[in-house]
Amino acid sequence: DIVMTQSPLSLPVTPGEPASISCRSSQSLLRSNGNNYLDWYLQKPGRSPQLLIHLGSNRASGVPDRFSGSGSGTDFTLKISRVEAEDVGVYYCMQAQQSPRTFGQGTKLEIK
Amino acid sequence: QVQLQESGPGLVKPSETLSLTCTVSGGSIRGYFWSWIRQTPGKGLEWIGFVHSTGNTDYNPSLRSRVSLSLDTSNNHFSLRLISVTAADTAVYFCARHYNSGSFPLDYWGQGTLVTVSS
């Protein structure tokens, strides 16, 4: 299985400040079509996960443009340009390169 | 708007079978992949497997010997069956739909249902 490793596991952020989460995979998520098979999800408190980013850098429908995804191969980053109170929760990366799909451990973003 | 709702027993005895159903509303079950994912404090999010409306399935090897997924297009729902459960199968179980392009991400999720394995 592909192992997904996120850092940091806890991320306190002041509202209005940027935030960055790293996700590394044990194998490359880049396919010959040029796409990286990496998705990002946010699980808000008491809720189910919601899709933020797919194929490494494509924002899902309705996701604010303060969220952006980047990276290729085995190293990926989710950035929030200016954190808002509604962004609190646990962020997960998930690889879709091969079966079984596997998730990172999660990064808990909290407001300072 | 597509909505998913899990249903089934919240308590299952050890060695028995866990059965859950995910009812899809606001859209057809046809033409999509549908997954089950579970979440525990210790192991985080774990993908269990998917079923396509054509009947095609794929399972996590860690559960393959005990799990089966099925789909009912007439009633617009799909189901999970996990046999020989132990306390390690205690988790919140989510059903989710795969978007039909790219990395086939999970774009719609149910609210999740807690299943406890205990005598």
Image (spheres, coloured by chain):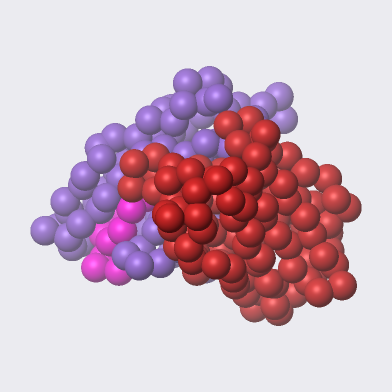
Chain colours: A purple, B red
Q: Is residue A74 above or below residue B25?
A: above
Q: Quadrant of the C terminus of chain A?
A: bottom left
Q: Is residue A95 above or below residue B6?
A: above
Q: Which residue is the extreme one toward the front?
A: B119
- Residue B7, percent across and down? 59, 70
Is A62 displayed left or right of A77 in the figure? right
Q: Which residue is the extreme one toward the left?
A: A112
Q: Which residue is the extreme one toward the top?
A: A27
Q: Quadrant of the N terminus of chain A?
A: top right
What residue is at 17 percent from the left and 60 percent from the top?
A111
- Residue A22, percent across and down? 34, 35
Is B74 displayed left or right of B107 in the figure? right
Is B80 displayed left or right of A22 in the figure? right
> Is B73 covered by the magenta stretch?
no
User: Which residues are drawn in magenta?
Assistant: A80-91
What residue is at 25 percent from the left and 40 percent from the top?
A9
Q: In this rendering, does residue B1 appear at all?
A: yes
What residue is at 65 percent from the left and 39 percent from the top?
B66
Is B69 displayed left or right of B31 in the figure? left
Q: How many marks?
A: 0
- Residue A56, percent across and down? 53, 41
What residue is at 73 percent from the left and 39 percent from the top?
B58
Q: Looking at this view, is B4 or A71 the one in front?
A: B4
